[in-house]
Image (spheres, rainbow, N blue to C red):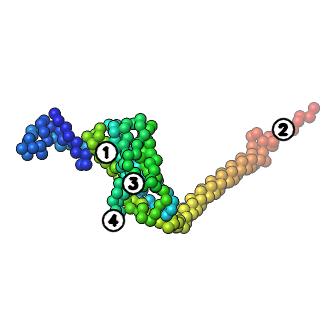
Amino acid sequence: MTGARQGGRGLVFLGWGDPWWSPRGGGAPHTGLFLLPVSLSLEVSVGKATTIYAVNGTEILLPCTFSSCFGFENLRFWWSYNSTDTFKILIDGTVKNEKSDPKVKLKDDDRITLEGTTKEKVNNISILLRNLEFSDSGRYTCHVKNPKENHLQHQATITLQVVDKLEEVDNTVTLIILAVVGGVIGLLIFILLVKKFIAFIIKKTQEKKKECLVSSSGNDNTENGLPGSKAEEKPPTKV
């Protein structure tokens, strides 16, 4: 049985003989050929944010991490820059294995520094771009190719916008909403506390009334000469 992976589409072909497009197969499908979709084992990530902003003249870290279920050997990575009128490779390097740090073989700009490491399963190949210029705005793509997975390749893109200054986000509406919600919650808690306090006072008042009724009932029995009362007592016998 032979197997071939088509990394870009996430497909695995399993069967006897060559795949159906093989010249030796004459273009005819082979018996016992199966087409199974699988998730890519090599993954590249540049974080959750698709666009990041930085001030002109400062520096920015462009994040990139990768993971592989099958490990890697002589892995190749590179960063590319793409704008409306420019495309170039910024940095190109390799990683021998999981115990080695990445080595840079090509760097287009001295302002770029590789900040990542692959030790301790971090697999970080982020780059730091210093002295930002407005012309640095564009799309930055982190590419990874793993020879151990039949040269499977994956990439992820992040967009950089270089601006004069970062705009402050107006949180007035958010603060008003939080204040209203907090006020409503506080009011509900206050009402519950008052309700419990009133219930406690009513309970104590009812207990005092019961005690008064019991005491009053005992006094009435004494005055009416009922059994057990003082009126039932006989005067002492004269000798």
Q: How far apart are marks 4 and 3 (CA)?
A: 17 Å
Q: Quadrant for residue 11, please give it.
A: top left
Pointers 2 and 3 in contact (CB under 8 A)? no
Crowd band around label 2 with a 10 angstrom C-alpha radius: few (<14), some (14–19), many (20+): few
Any mark on residue 18, and which? none
Say which amino acid is labelled 2.
Lys
Circle nearer the N terminus (4, 3):
4
Amino acid type, callout 4: Asp
Task: Write down the residue under mark 2.
Answer: 234
**Sequence order check: which comes first, mark 3 or mark 1?**
3
Q: What residue type is labelled 1?
A: Lys
Point out the frontmost of discs 1 and 2: 1
Q: Can residue 125 be seen in this view?
A: yes
The Cα–Cα distance between marks 3 and 1, rounded to whole angstroms, is 20 Å
Q: Earlier in the sequence, mark 2 or mark 3?
A: 3
Mark 4 or 2: the one toward you: 4
Between 72 and 110, the residue placed more toward the observer is 110
Residue at 41 percent across and 42 percent down: it is 102
Identity of the amino acid at label 3? Asp
Closer to the eye: label 2 or 3: 3
Provide the residue designation for mark 1: 145
The residue under label 4 is 85
The percent position of residue 205, horizontal first and vertical second, equals 69, 53
Mark 3 is surrounded, within 10 Å at the Cα level, by few (under 14), some (14 to 19) or many (20 or more) other residues, namely: few
* Precedes in sequence: disc 1 or disc 4: 4
